[in-house]
Amino acid sequence: MGSENFDSRAAEWDSDPDKVSRAQEVAAAILEAVPIEPSARLLEYGAGTGLVTQALRERVGPVVLADNSRGMRQVMQQKIDAGVLPDAEVWDLDLERDAVPDEQFDLVVTSLVLHHVRDLPTVLAGFAALLRPGGHVFVADLDREDGSFHQHDFDGHHGFDRAELAAALEQAGFSQVRVTDCTTLLKEGTPYSVFLATAQR
Ligand SMILES: C[S@@+](CC[C@H](N)C(=O)[O-])C[C@H]1O[C@@H](n2cnc3c(N)ncnc32)[C@H](O)[C@@H]1O
C-alpha cells in the first residue's frame, strides 16, 4: 500500500489528542499483558510518529522504529534528535516488500498497522523471524468493522475477526495467543473497538 497518505499526515499526527491517548492506552495494555524486562529490545512496526514507543520508552531497552512512510520517519527522527525518543533508531521497512533484516528483538509491537497490510502471512512471518525464541509480539488493531472506517480507495482489511487473526499468528509460528479488549477509537462520531493480541514466538 502506498505511503503518500501517511506522508502528508505525519507533521500533524501528534496534534490530535485522541491519537496520543490511544497510543498510551495501547502501551498500558502491552505492559499489563506480560512482564517486560527493562533491557528488552523493542521493534515497533508501522510506528508512525512513535507514540506507542514513546509511552513505553522508560520501560524497555533500545528501540527500533520502523515505518514505510518517509514523512513518519522524518517526524520520528526529529523526536530522536530532540531527545524525546532516546536510544532509538529509525528503519525504512516494509515487510511485504523488503527482506527481513538479520536482527533479533525481544518484543515486536504494531498498532493499527496490520489492517493496511495486504499480505498478512508474510508480515507475521517477518515478525516471527525478527523475534528471539520466547519473545513476544503485540498486535493492536481494529475489530472487524463494516467498511466505514476507511471510506475511499482502501484495499486493506476491514478490521479483523479475533479468532482468524489468532489462527494467522499460530500459522506464523506463534503460540500462547491471547486477544483482549484494548481501547475504542472514535472516528467522525462512530466508535470502533480495538483489540490487543499477544503471542509468544
Ligand atoms: C494508522 S497509522 C498508526 C501509527 C502508529 N502505529 C500509531 O498507533 O499511532 C499506520 C502506520 O503504519 C504505517 N504502515 C502502513 N503499512 C505499512 C507497511 N506495509 N510497512 C510499514 N509501515 C506501514 C503507516 O505509514 C503509518 O505510519
Image (cartoon, helix red, strand yellow):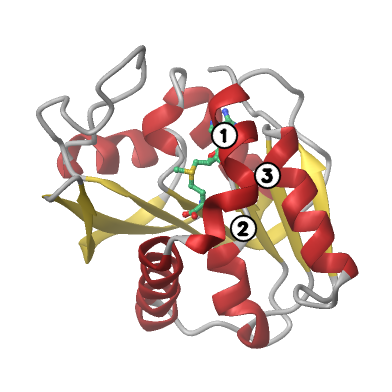
State which quadrant residue 194 falls in.
Answer: bottom left
Q: Which amino acid does label 3 sit on?
A: Met
x 61%, y 33%: residue: 8
- Which element carries disc 3, helix, strand or loop? helix
CB under 8 Å between callouts 3 and 1? yes
- Residue situated furthest right in the rendering: 81
For marks 1 and 2, the one nearer the N-term is 1
Instruction: From the image, state whether disc 2 or disc 3 is nearer to you.
Output: 3
Residue 169, given in percent of the width and then of the height, sits at 38, 41
Q: Is residue 109 left or right of residue 194?
A: right
Above or below 74: residue 117: above
x 48%, y 85%: residue: 35
- Which element carries disc 1, helix, strand or loop? helix
Residue 12, given in percent of the width and then of the height, sits at 57, 51
Q: Name the residue under label 2.
A: 133
Residue 18, given in percent of the width and then of the height, sits at 35, 64
In depth, the one of 143 and 73 nearer the eye is 73
Above or below 158: residue 110: below
Residue 186, given in percent of the width and then of the height, sits at 20, 54
x 67%, y 33%: residue: 69
Give the spatial CA distance, label 1 vs label 2.
Answer: 33 Å
Q: Name the residue under label 1.
A: 6
Res. 48 in view: no
- Which element carries disc 2, helix, strand or loop? strand
CB under 8 Å between callouts 2 and 3? no
Q: Mark 3 points at which residue?
A: 72
Give the spatial CA distance, label 3 vs label 1.
Answer: 7 Å
Q: If the picture is divided into quarters, which one holds ligand 1?
A: top right
State which quadrant residue 165 falls in.
Answer: top left
For marks 3 and 1, the one nearer the N-term is 1
